[in-house]
Image (spheres, rainbow, N blue to C red):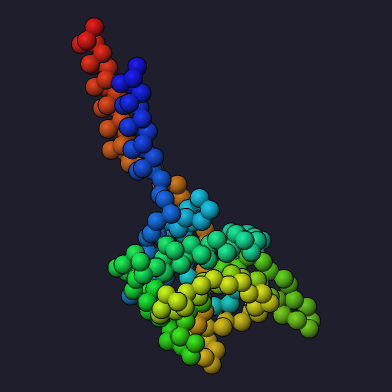
Amino acid sequence: MKKFLMFFSIFATLSLAMGMNGAGAATLVFEDGQLTGANGITVNGVLYDVSFEDGSANNIYDYDDLTFNTVDEATLASTALLDQVFNSDLDGDYASVDNNYSLTFGIDNNFFGVGWIETVYAFTPGNEDDPDVVSTTTTINGNLDSEDYVESLSNINAGENFSSGIFGDIEVYALWNEAAPVPVPGAVWLLGSGLIAIFGIRRRVNR
């Protein structure tokens, strides 16, 4: 019985290790040398994919189906971008996009020397006198780690593209979607079946 429990524990551990991603580095997505998003970002224990979109919030988001709906949820997502994407401690491409904000799609060298990645969590419709506005949490990525932080913003004009202002292209929106479950590789199941078969053979031989 003890041997069976040992084999079962090994099998379960391998299955969990292969089938689950921790809150480590995400998979960066590049197109034409620019970071256009990332896959497998862990936010509060759930995996998400994100794409960086240039334009106005009205053109990018379905406000009836926002992925995050509170400032706390959006703050966790924006912080995850700093921890799992724009992180020079991870080396390689992660350090490159952290140390050079203009490698992010939609963001160029600009007056402020930073890139803003906005995660929308609330929408307020406008009227005859006031425009539609959104509330966001913002991942601010500078060329130095000391310039990286997250802040919340409100009353951002939802119909305006702030990446085309007089100060240069400074902002993109983060479009989040929950990632599809990662299937457990067949090799893990094969290994588990092999361990169980070996255990069964040894039991018969020992009888």
Work out whether 31 lies above or below 177.
Answer: below
Q: Quadrant of residue 205?
A: top left
* Front residue of this view, candidates 168 and 13: 13
Q: Picture coordinates of residue 96 (x, y %)?
A: 34, 74
What residue is at 42 percent from the left and 87 percent from the top? 109
Measured as percent of width and height from the top left, residue 80 is found at 48, 62
Q: Residue furthest top?
A: 207
Residue 61 % position (x, y):
59, 67
Left or right? Give the position of 181 relative to 129. left
Whole-percent x and y of residue 76? 55, 61
Depth order, front residue of 183/83: 83
Q: Quadrant of residue 142?
A: bottom left
Q: Residue at x 50, y 75 (%)?
A: 140
Q: Quadrant of the C terminus?
A: top left
The extreme bottom residue here reads 166
Q: Residue furthest front?
A: 146
Who's the residue at 61% across and 82% down the image? 160
Residue found 40% across the figure and 49% down from its top: 21
Front residue of 189/42: it is: 42
| 195 left or right, relative to 23 | left
Q: Residue furthest right?
A: 128
- Answer whether residue 150 is visible to the viewer in this image: yes
Vertical order, 205 against 124 (above or below) = above
Residue 53 in view (yes/no) = no
